[in-house]
Amino acid sequence: MGDHLQVHLKNEKFIPMKNAQKIEKVPLVGQSLEKIILNVQEMGFPKFRGKQIFQWLYQHRVNDFSDMKNVPNAIREKCGESFNIHPLELKLHTQSNQEPTEKFLFTLKRGENIESVLMKDRKRNTICISTQVGCAVDCDFCATAKMGFQKNLTVGEIVDQFIQVQNLATIPITNIVFMGMGEPFLNYKNVISAADLLNHPEGTQMGARRITISTAGVVSKIKQFAEEKHKYKLAISLNASNESVRKEIMPITKTHGLNALMEAADIYYQSSGRFPTFEYVLMEGINDSLRDAHDLTRLIGRQPCKLNVIPYNEIGGYYKRPSDDKIKSFLSQLKNVPFQVTVRWSRGTDIKAGCGQLAASSDS
Ligand code: SAH
């Protein structure tokens, strides 16, 4: 029976199941140190070889088992029989003509696409990574929402974005933000494991304070994040100065109300001592009035926090970016507020790499 069974692969070729099983290798990127040690021991090799392989994968970011110089041939070959290295395949690499910003389109094993963005600056080089294919949160103004939800990324698919982009980049990446496609806190377990791997002292060694996770406001997970005392920074997409506007533009507000969200943000501050950052996407006629600036100050000014204002990146729909004058006057209302205000002028909008523009299509 086996020989007659067929498997449909993404390249449209039909191959017999027996052979298909043989080539179905498991990617190592995404596996923890403990898991890699276990794999190596199961193959009959000593524990310390597992640690060496872990370092080759995450510190040296090798693309081939043959590059693992201090690992004996026999182990490399045995690994190569059951495992490969990367869960992602790079499909497209685009460079902005406006800024030093690059976008990377990756394909998953079953053919779905995701995107990552690298933003280079004099002081910091930040990678923005995706956590899901599409998104279920359905914010009305966001391009990713238009894709619907397709799947949660695995730990490997999240971490491999960093590994592969760092290998292609000519500069060291200094910061990681979980602000690409998807809602990180609806893929909580994998996102935290991915952050832990990126922060691992034997691995990529990205400092915890250089890793930021952004959520649309999944209240229970913000509380869990606080209780578990993770050291990563937290950003919360607020985007409105009151409950009724937030409900209109972010349907998640219907189940995760604004009061509960503010309370969860405070719980995070109380347990971590770190200020949550509220993100506020500024949209013309929606949340950019002087009244909004006033209400926003009243809403968040009661608790320790920071505010990041993001002038809207248009995606060809209903929502518009306010004029520069309107943005300026909104910001001038926030001059004497009791919290720090920063502005994120999104970069790479010419290649649809700005906040909220990621939709994993290969036409940009
Ligand atoms: N789901 C997470 C992370 C992804 S979105 C979250 O909501 O936080 C990252 C940020 O981009 C969020 O603050 C979101 O509100 C913002 N955003 C979405 N669409 C945008 C757009 N078109 N222009 C500017 N910012 C946008």
Image: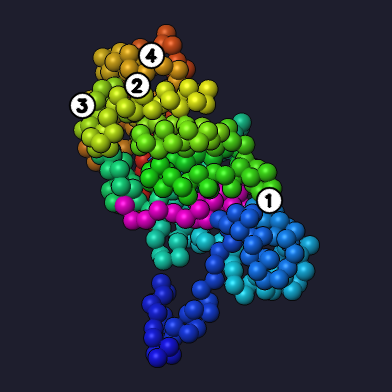
Measured in 3D between alpha carbons, the distance from the residue under mark 3 to the one under mark 4, in whole angstroms, is: 20 Å
Regarding residue 250, the answer to whether it shows in the image is no
Say whether marks 4 and 1 touch (CB < 8 Å).
no
Q: Which label lies toward us, 1 or 2? A: 1
Q: Which label lies toward us, 4 or 1? A: 4
Closer to the chain start, of discs 2 and 4, is 4
Q: Amino acid at mark 4?
A: Arg
Residue at 56% across, 64% down: 27
Give the x, y percent position of residue 307.
42, 22
* Residues in magenta, as a range: 149-170
Q: Amino acid at mark 3?
A: Ser
Q: Is residue 295 left or right of residue 335?
A: left
**What kind of element bears circle 2?**
helix
10 Å crowding of disc 1: few (<14), some (14-19), many (20+)? some
Q: Which label lies toward us, 3 or 4? A: 4
The residue wearing badge 1 is: 59
Closer to the chain start, of discs 1 and 2, is 1
Give the x, y percent position of residue 280.
36, 27
The residue wearing badge 3 is: 244
Q: Amino acid at mark 1?
A: Gln
Measured in 3D between alpha carbons, the distance from the residue under mark 3 to the one under mark 1, in whole angstroms, is: 47 Å
